[in-house]
Amino acid sequence: MAMPSPSALHSDSAEEKEDIDDDDFHDVEEDMDDDDICDVEIWPATILSTDPLIHEDSAQVATKLRAIFDSGKPFFTRDAISSIVQSFDKALGQGQEQRLDGTVVVSIPDLVGNVIEFRLGTDTRHLQRRGRTSDTELAITEPCLHYLTIEMLLDNLDLCQFGVEPVCAYLPMMVYFRTEQRNKFTKERVPLWPLSTHDEVAASFQAIRQRWLATEHCAQLTSTLNQHAREIPPDIKKVVAFACSSMAISDPPSLRQTSASQHALVLYMRDFLSSRQDKAHDEIKCYAQDPIYEDVDKSVLGEVGIKVLSDPRGFLEVDEMSVVVSIAPNVPVRHIVMDITRPAIMIWDRVKPYGRLTTDPVSSRVMDIIRREYLELEFPYDREDFGHLCIYVRKK
């Protein structure tokens, strides 16, 4: 991609692997590069705030950013994300005619009190010239967010990298559009990869789910959770998943296996907690966010009780009575979640200082919160489908 995907939730294999031995790589991530499996390209929204606003040099901006971060000020807040979603919903029409024509404006506060405005519309003439073939064009589908952590903002201080403008030097969220390839004449979407039918995906998912539930890996997970049952917070109401990928893409076959196993984990956590809390399964809601989901994924997942949400709505479902499942995302899920709330349980990549290259960096803030407030449990190692995960349970 020309720019880092704002809400694609798969990480490049090299990025997430600093300080991990070669033998310990997530093979799944090596097969799940967004550039290889996803035809979602992103396009920046127009910034209406053209005044310089930022008058410091890069060294001064860096000093101020570090001071803001060290003060504990959240980069991502529920109120800011909720306000953005309201603007997105207004532009998308909520069942009425869409208004991605620039008439809706999104206002996002930065870290120093400025409000940056984005217009939810773009010049489609530029998009039409970006088709992958002479018969295709790029078309806008929906707005989304690009999230920037302290590491990313510091890396962008040359104010040129990825097209960053000076006005955005302190801005942790920016508006982009997702796009898709369409036939120039019929206007129908042109997938870049073969997609399976609903029945094929549903049958495959159920088979993979049942196989995984019968594995030693799942048995070890059950044993770990049962051993620490007293530490698990009561009355958990949600399981929110990020970056579990698509089961509809039929090539490579390993992608469906991995995606189905990860979605099986989401349902397993729902069922385990329902049994422990003496609740019906549908009393614990399941949500999933990943821009790569196809309509087939949404349908199949909906049938088994997982509601698919578009970015950034998944983050608004995360609260203190939720479980978060996040596996090698391409956005800073850990930083966003830790700024917004303290979930009851997080199942995600082991918290350790991978370095600033990773797309889901572990900042000192995230590490401090985890060490102070969470109990770390081992998630059984599975090279193919899960890699190096840990279970983090909020202390009582």
Image (spheres, rainbow, N blue to C red):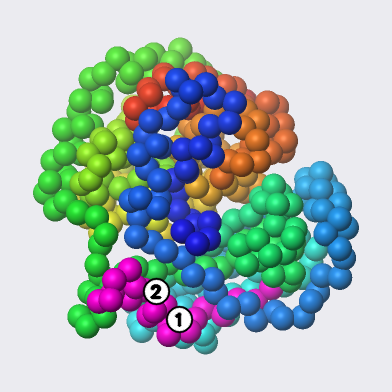
* Secondary element at tag 2: loop
Residue 166: x, y in percent?
74, 69
Which residue shows up at 58% across the image and 31% down it?
A: 18
Residue 150: x, y in percent?
71, 49
Which residue shows up at 29% across the image and 14% down it?
A: 216
Indicate the quadrant where residue 215 lies.
Answer: top left
Identify the amino acid type marked 2: Arg
Indicate the quadrant where residue 106 lies.
Answer: bottom right
- Classify mark 2: residues with Cα within 10 Å, few (<14), some (14-19) or many (20+): some
Highlighted range, magenta: 116-138
Residue 258: x, y in percent?
31, 35
Q: Which label was assigned to residue 18?
A: none
- Identify the residue position indicated by label 1 in the image: 126
* Secondary element at tag 1: helix
Magenta span includes 127: yes
Please give left or right for residue 146 compared with residue 268 in the image: right
Of the pair 355 and 214, the residue shown nearer to us: 355
Of the pair 251 and 107, the residue shown nearer to us: 251
- Identify the residue position indicated by label 2 in the image: 130
Identify the amino acid type marked 1: His
Magenta span includes 251: no
